[in-house]
Image (spheres, grey):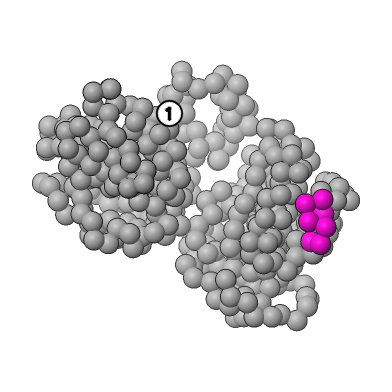
Amino acid sequence: MRAQALGLWPETGPRAERIAIIGPTFDEVRLVMIEGKSGLLGVHMDDERPVYESSKRLLTWPNGSIAQVFSADEPESLRGPQFDAAWCDELAKWKQAADVWNMLAFALRLGHSPRVAVTTTPRPTAMLKRLLADPSTAVTRSRTADNRAHLAGSFWNDVQARYGGTRLGRQELDGELIEDDPDALFRRELIELSRVAQVPDLARIVVAVDPPASHSRKSNACGIVCVGLGQDGRAYVLDDHSIRGARPAAWAQRVVALYHARKSDRVVAEVNQGGAMVEQVLREVDPHLAFRAVHASRGKQARAEPVAALYEQGRVHHVGTFPELEDEMCSAIRDGARSPDRLDALVWAVSDLMLRRGPEPRVRTI
């Protein structure tokens, strides 16, 4: 994008004068795309560096080029402005990718040949596959190893030991577009078909927790997933607030915050790992928390199979996108690269809402 704004590539035409910068959220645009170590402010020389006005969400270069900042959570904000270039980051994480892309297409109407640069982890989402199939798309790939000289040695050794040679490693480290594991219980195409943007009236909401055995950086994540049961009898996945490397007090605070934010009916937590400790740390944050302990008497795959059947029946919907959770669903069951902690939490939540009898529902709107 620096080259576009400064006109350093004459073969692509004159400099871009009006640019759209779009990321998953405004915070990610600012912290990664603009102010990050490799962000726009860091890759310019002093005399060419743009000025960022956060209140206006505007970058202005000394030569007069400007860039407006947008969040992929607000596709309608792209209605009206016009551009001759755009930079889209982590498109595979966008919750409303198709809507944002369509609005951007209408806005790219300036200059001789408007161009879009997309930088993203290649998760096999419908939008990304659509772009890769477009003959006008030029594709380049970069492996984490190509940037090894700028990475901490401990990081490199850790990710190689944990993910080297795995499906997840090929995606995250080698930049490969990995299609679903044909043996996985969950299929991405079914998730895509059932994805929704709006939530109906909900009868019940639960937050499910799959706690880790330890809190070290290399330990499994604490799976924290919130799911609601609609008046239509379908489940709606609302949030994935899973966290890695957090101490019990930290993940407990996150669970309770989500519980209250969603006005949930209860927290459902697997207690095989921590026993009474799981309920204890949660009640230290909120003594009045509605809590139910669940025990894993069957293997992960056996517990997930009834939930996978609900997905096949179109009875579970994702409200937006949850890339890490969906990656686990479509590969981690049989992959063995890591424990599917987010998936475990999802299974407990959906099972509590749809595979066991609960209290009489009450209508609620969120």
Q: Nearer the viewer, residue 276 or 317?
A: 276
Report helix, strand or loop for mark 1. loop
Q: Amino acid at mark 1?
A: Lys
At x 66% / y 77%, what residue is drawn?
A: 203
To which quarter of the image does residue 361 belong? bottom right
Q: Nearer the viewer, residue 236 or 57?
A: 57
Residue 353 belongs to the span the image colors magenta: no
- Please provide percent x and percent y for residue 262: 63, 64
Most extreme residue toward the right is 276
Tell me the quadrant of the picture where the N terminus can be found.
top left
Query: In this rendering, does residue 29 appear at all?
Result: yes
At x 49% / y 61%, what residue is drawn?
A: 320
At x 34% / y 55%, what residue is drawn?
A: 130
Q: Nearer the viewer, residue 327 or 7?
A: 7
Tell me the quadrant of the picture where the C terminus can be found.
bottom right
Most extreme residue toward the front is 55
User: Which residue bears the numbered disc 1?
Assistant: 37
Residue 117 horizontal side relative to residue 211, left or right: left
Residue 41 horizontal side relative to residue 295, left or right: left
Q: Which residues are magenta?
A: 283-289
User: Crowding near pointer 1: few (<14 within 10 Å), some, many (20+)?
Assistant: few
